[in-house]
Image (spheres, helix red, strand yellow):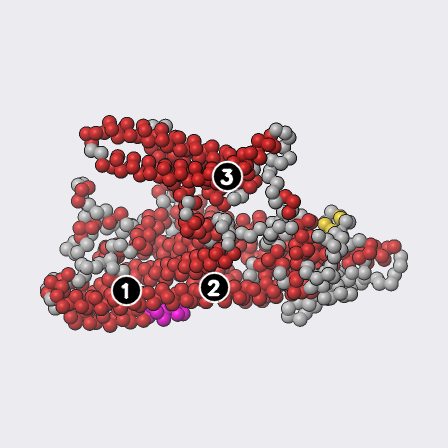
Amino acid sequence: MAGNIESPLLIRNENGFSPSDEDQYDVPSNRIHSNGDSIYDVNNGFGSNHQILEGQGTPYHAITRRHKQYKTWELNYQEAAIYLQEGENNDKYSTHPRDFNALPAYKIAHKKIFYALDLFAALLVMGLAACERPAVPFLTLPVGVHGSLELFGLLILALELGIRMKWLGFRTFIKHKRTLIKSCTLIIVFIETIVVIIRQHNHFRVTRSLRPLFLIDTYYCRGVRRTFRQILQSMPPIIDMLLLLLFFMLIFSILGFYLFSGIHGDAYFATLQDSFISLFVLLTTANYPDVMMPAYASSRYYSIFYIIYLSLELYFIMNLFLAVVYDTFSNLEKTKVKKLFFHKRLGCQHAFRLLVTKEDNKSIKLKHFLGMMKHLRPKKSRRDGYLVFKMLNMGTSGALTLEEFHKIYEAIDLQWMLKSDENIIWSSHFKYPFNRIFRCIHSFVKWKWFKRFIYFAIASNFLIILVETIQISVTIEADRHKITDRENWASVASTVYVCIYIVEAILKILGKGPAVYFTSGWDLFDFVVTGTSVIGLLGEFFDDSFYFIIVLRPFKLLRLFKVKERYRDVLGTLFVLFTRLISLAIVIILVYYFFAIIGMEMFLHTNLRNCCKNTSVEAYYKYSNDSTNQMYYYLNNFDNILESGVTLFELTVVNNWFIIMEGYAHHIGEWSRVYFMLFYIVMMVVMNIVVAFILEQFLFRMQYNRKMEVKDIEGKVLIKN
């Protein structure tokens, strides 16, 4: 495998691999920054004021020369790794450390502990929304306490910005848009926090809605940041479609006002404002056919107005809107992939210039590649680094050319195994007779009839649970003892099936080995479902206070996804895209947070009980001691961050959302409708982008799986060497 590759380095010191005596003439090429300024001088080193004394034969000068060359190479390795990391993380190269003095600050700011501290501070500041006015009852904190906690979190965020300014420089710092926005937001929130602590009282703080910016800027929310960026980049064509949608809505509002304002009892079109609001709600179908019935009672021909409006707005323009969103999002995805490809190549080129020598500036030697790898992937072994080099090196020179080096991102995180280990199971090195026993277990769990038996058990378990639930649901109160008998029988059946699943899990762990079992997507999925089934079974043996655990029993039926290939594709795609879907979910949560803060400041302590007298929504807010005639809409409030989230979710689902809007409009004022309508438009855009993303990624994944014949849940290809 190493026929045309130079031997790995054998000399180590406490800092890693150092050049051997034969390498003392490996002088790095000049390092030129992207703006043309020379940052390192080959002769002086990075930040050194002493010249390398070439031609001096004394041992002192030889050692000094070798030491300075080693120091220069170490700096080159570090900066080359930084360039590759910037390419991998899609960071701008303009934010690259400007000189040697900026390198310590850069390394501190890019440590995982610092990433975690930054994330903690952002989550702390955001989480205080549950402790401040209006607070969740059991989380309420005094003003001084939550004010001090907020100040503590803001100081951590300020520290991160200070370190960032240290390695960016002031000029680059203020030119970096995301950093500048974060700094301005931090200053505003910091001043407000000081005012709150001094006054010991919470004032109108709508700027709290800007706190998600701190979370978006963290390292661990890169996916969320990219999603937000794509949403903002998608806005121009989306806004055009929204304007078209609202334009036609306004045209029909004017027409509806002239047609229906004179109809007795039709309050939906009494004014132009009522007409526009009614048609806006009609677009969501939440008030259909109620909005049509007064006009329809006057003349059957008036239904033509609603049919044309819904056909145009709901079924044509809204679907066209989704198509525009999908097309825009797809193009942005392709553009992003293209830009990221060239961004990575540029990072490779910067790193390449740091790893070549004066004697050979066309290729990278193994020792310099390994020196860079220990900074780029510190946890990777020397063997892994050598295998990556071997995979990239397609020529016979024993060194990497630039074209070969461009492929480093494809190879750097590959997992390697020996071909000879392909058929070796974990128990092969056990002593006799245990190796034979475990090999038999391994063969048994791989046996097709064992798999078919498990599938049969899952299917029969599904039928038993279904029949049992139907029988219980139709049993009358007089036959309650029959329910008890069925429950006892069902508990026995459930116990049998759970035992089968436990035995299956144990056999697979013993046969495949824990390392293989717990790194396989489907096996891990089976283990989680089996564990959930065990918890549900144990819950059945406790008293009624634990009865809610029994609802976990049907979760074992999720294993049916494995029976049909189509279901495996769906679930496998879900697992593969899980990280991106989490990013989209966080985006939605942050949008909720933004509107929840604004809603709490606008509608705090609004009591909707028995409101909206003499209106069409009066019955929804009726409150009395008789709970049978209540619809409980008065519970939809903005009294704290959690209840605000529930209210916003109800608005997102759309069904009867206008009733909540009408309640606040009658109690607070007509201007409050702007909040609810704006929230609907924003969520419509976001949810359409979510749909576009799922369609794009799912179709791509399905096509990829078919082309590459990938069957496993992770969709990974194993490269063996």
Whichever of labels 2 and 3 marks the residue nearer the N terminus, that label is 2
Q: Amino acid at mark 3?
A: Trp
| SS at badge 3 | loop
Q: Residues within 10 Å of mark 1 (few under 14, many from 20)?
A: some
Closer-to-camera residue (530/42) = 530
Q: Position of residue 488 (x, y in %)?
A: 31, 28
Which residue is located at x 34 percent, y 60 percent?
Answer: 684
Q: Which residue matches tag 3?
A: 447
Q: Which residue matches tag 2?
A: 333
| SS at badge 1 | helix
Q: What kind of secondary structure does the magenta stretch mostly adopt? A: helix
Q: Position of residue 644 (x, y in %)?
A: 33, 51
Q: Where 402 sits versus 649, above or below?
A: below
Q: Which residue matches tag 1?
A: 314
Which residue is located at x 14 percent, y 55 percent?
Answer: 614
Occupied quadrant, residue 429: top right
Q: CA distance from mark 2 to mark 3?
A: 43 Å
Q: CA distance from mark 3 to mark 1?
A: 54 Å
Residue range in magenta is: 234-243
Whichever of labels 3 and 1 marks the residue nearer the N terminus, that label is 1
